[in-house]
């Protein structure tokens, strides 16, 4: 299908707009979509499935580097077995690990869907939250310990090592319960 | 079953309360999408892991909920419900059409006043939904967070530092939060201002839909405004942005109502009284016409043109005159023609209950 704006390029974005109960469909290319801010996802009802297939069978206007545009057929998730092609076709992840498996492809998708955003800025679950903070603390302590060793402050290094062990022990327990 | 009894069973208790800005805002809703880390998402799950999801959530909710009786959650398994029962739950907005029709091992947990419903094995393992009358976004988010924290005490959520709460659909990732406000906007439709307002709202990253969700007409001038983005903004910011837009739409609707009353009082009265007449006298009525007349009557109540009719009549009858409820009331499966007759009878009888 050709783009309804320029009638040149292949339409890769498909929107449904509902105004006062009246449904209108738009089929446009990435290039024209960028020029017409009105069509930008996040500002319209549109089908995630169509968006994904648009990105997958991109017409060269996909805002990616060419190399990341190439999708190896083997790209798939180990945990649930879903391939990237399946994901793009149905528009749904099969499990939490899909996010890791397809990570290199996700930023452009999230940017389109979430108004340019790719990073979470909201609530953190209490349990995961405390372990995330402890992991950060652990990293800092390990760096500090290295510094003490370099400075030959071995007593301080030993103290720090004990604190690190304690936190590591706690994190391990948290995982077991 | 008497009509009064049927209505009191059919209308969720939370709907009978009146909320802030209730002349325009019918209800506020929040839903949080969550998944359990150890299981694959419902789309890829087998029967066993789906049942484990249900078992783990129902056991943890029962443990936590030895508190107040009113807060106890009742569980319904989709496979044990008749199609008409599921349809009624959908028409009450307690479960999604997707859970009723598609989900293989779906279940729902509900509290007594039906303001909290937790869907299991829908698109995500867990979908927490909280409802309240009128504009009460903070309250519904607070309640949803409470349920969220409760569940999180017992399960490990699929969560990633970078992407937030991981959901099956990329449109829900991050906060997993969808907040929606149901609004009655008859004056903006009558004055045709709505056609300029909806694109403006879209520009701000919010979605506007008719009452029955995406792709359908706005029956009864009821519109649902909700956030589209779930990633990159905090829950509070999402709610604030939505509330800001909703307040503006409320102002616009109020000024359009005033404009109609000032400039076209007689024409407006004529229209609203005719619609009341239709509802009082109809013998056969299709859902579209019923919705239009109910919208007019509700506007008449809010503008005090039609006194002596209770405000909840629009909410009530919009729900009661849907196919599932009509068939439940009739106690049998009805053809569309039979439904139109039943609908007319039900509306006439309901209006007779008003002390006028
Ligand atoms: Zn074009
Ligand atoms: Zn996966």
Image (tube, coloured by chain):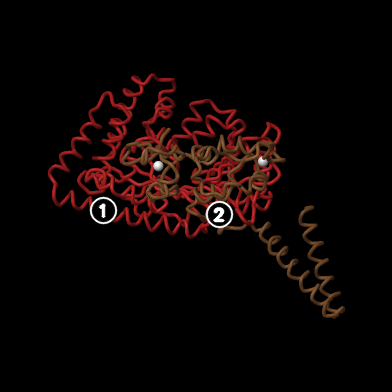
Q: What is the x, y in percent for residue B238?
A: 47, 56
* Residue drawn at 41 percent across, 49 percent down: A43
Q: Tell me the colour chain B is drawn in.
A: red
| Front residue of A114 and B91 | A114
The residue carrying mark 2 is A118
**Up-down relation of residue B24 to residue B49 (above or below):** below
Residue under numbered circle 1: B254
The quarter of the picture showing ligand 2: top right
In front of the other: A54 or A129: A54
Indicate the position of residue A94 as horizontal and vertical percent values. Answer: 64, 39
Residue B213 visible: no
| B194 displayed left or right of B176 | left
Which-is-in-front pick, marks 2 and 1? 2
Q: Residue at x 22, y 46 (%)?
A: B191
Which chain does the numbered disc 1 sit on? Answer: B
- Quarter of the image with the N terminus of chain B in it: top left
Label 1: element kind: helix
**The chain shown in brown is which?**
A
Question: Which chain is mark 2 on?
Answer: A
Residue A129, relative to residue B78: is it above or below?
A: below
Compared across the picture, whether A27 is left or right of B108 comes to left
| Residue A151, placed above or below residue A108 | below
């Amino acid at each position: 299908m050709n783009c309804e704006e320029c009638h040149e390029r292949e339409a890769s974005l498909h929107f449904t707009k509902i105004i006062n109960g009246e449904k209108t469909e738009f089929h446009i290319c990435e290039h024209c979509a960028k020029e017409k801010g009105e069509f930008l996802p996040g500002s319209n009802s549109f089908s995630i499935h169509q968006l994904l297939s648009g990105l997958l069978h991109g017409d060269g206007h996909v805002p990616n580097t060419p190399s990341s545009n190439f999708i190896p057929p083997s790209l798939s998730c180990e945990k649930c077995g879903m391939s990237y092609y399946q994901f793009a076709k149905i528009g749904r992840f099969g499990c939490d690990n899909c996010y890791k498996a397809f990570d290199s492809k996700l930023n452009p998708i999230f940017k389109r869907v979430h108004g340019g955003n790719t990073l979470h800025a909201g609530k953190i679950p209490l349990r995961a939250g405390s372990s995330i903070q402890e992991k950060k603390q652990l990293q800092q302590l390990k760096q500090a310990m290295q510094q003490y060793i370099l400075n030959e402050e071995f007593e301080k290094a030993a103290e720090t090592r004990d604190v690190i062990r304690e936190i590591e022990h706690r994190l391990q327990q948290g995982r077991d319960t | 079953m008497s009509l009064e009894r049927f209505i009191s069973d059919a209308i969720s208790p939370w709907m009978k309360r009146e909320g802030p800005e209730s002349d325009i805002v019918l209800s506020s809703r929040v839903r949080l999408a969550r998944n359990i880390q150890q299981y694959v998402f419902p789309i890829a799950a087998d029967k066993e892991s789906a049942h484990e999801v249900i078992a783990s959530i129902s056991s943890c909710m029962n443990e936590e909920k030895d508190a107040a009786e009113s807060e106890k959650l009742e569980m319904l398994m989709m496979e044990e419900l008749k199609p008409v029962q599921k349809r009624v739950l959908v028409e009450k907005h307690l479960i999604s059409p997707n859970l009723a029709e598609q989900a293989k091992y779906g279940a729902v947990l509900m509290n007594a006043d039906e303001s909290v419903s937790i869907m299991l094995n829908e698109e995500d393992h867990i979908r927490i939904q909280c409802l309240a009358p009128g504009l009460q976004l903070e309250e519904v988010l607070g309640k949803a967070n409470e349920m969220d924290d409760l569940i999180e005490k017992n399960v490990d959520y699929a969560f990633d530092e970078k992407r937030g709460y991981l959901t099956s659909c990329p449109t829900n990732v991050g906060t997993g939060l969808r907040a929606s406000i149901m609004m009655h906007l008859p004056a903006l439709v009558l004055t045709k201002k709505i056609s300029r307002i909806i694109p403006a709202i879209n520009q701000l990253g919010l979605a506007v839909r008719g009452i029955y969700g995406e792709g359908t007409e706005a029956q009864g001038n009821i519109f649902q405004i909700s956030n589209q983005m779930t990633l990159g903004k905090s829950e509070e910011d999402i709610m604030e942005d939505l509330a800001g837009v909703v307040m503006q739409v409320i102002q616009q609707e109020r000024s359009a109502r005033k404009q109609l009353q000032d400039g076209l009082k007689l024409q407006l009265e004529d229209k609203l009284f005719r619609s009341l007449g239709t509802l009082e006298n109809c013998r056969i009525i299709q859902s579209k016409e019923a919705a239009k007349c109910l919208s007019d009557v509700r506007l008449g109540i809010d503008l005090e043109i039609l006194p002596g009719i209770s405000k909840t009549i629009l909410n009530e009858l919009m729900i009661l005159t849907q196919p599932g409820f009509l068939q439940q009331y009739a106690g049998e499966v009805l053809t569309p023609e039979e439904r139109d007759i039943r609908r007319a009878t039900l509306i006439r009888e309901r209006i007779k209950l008003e002390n006028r």
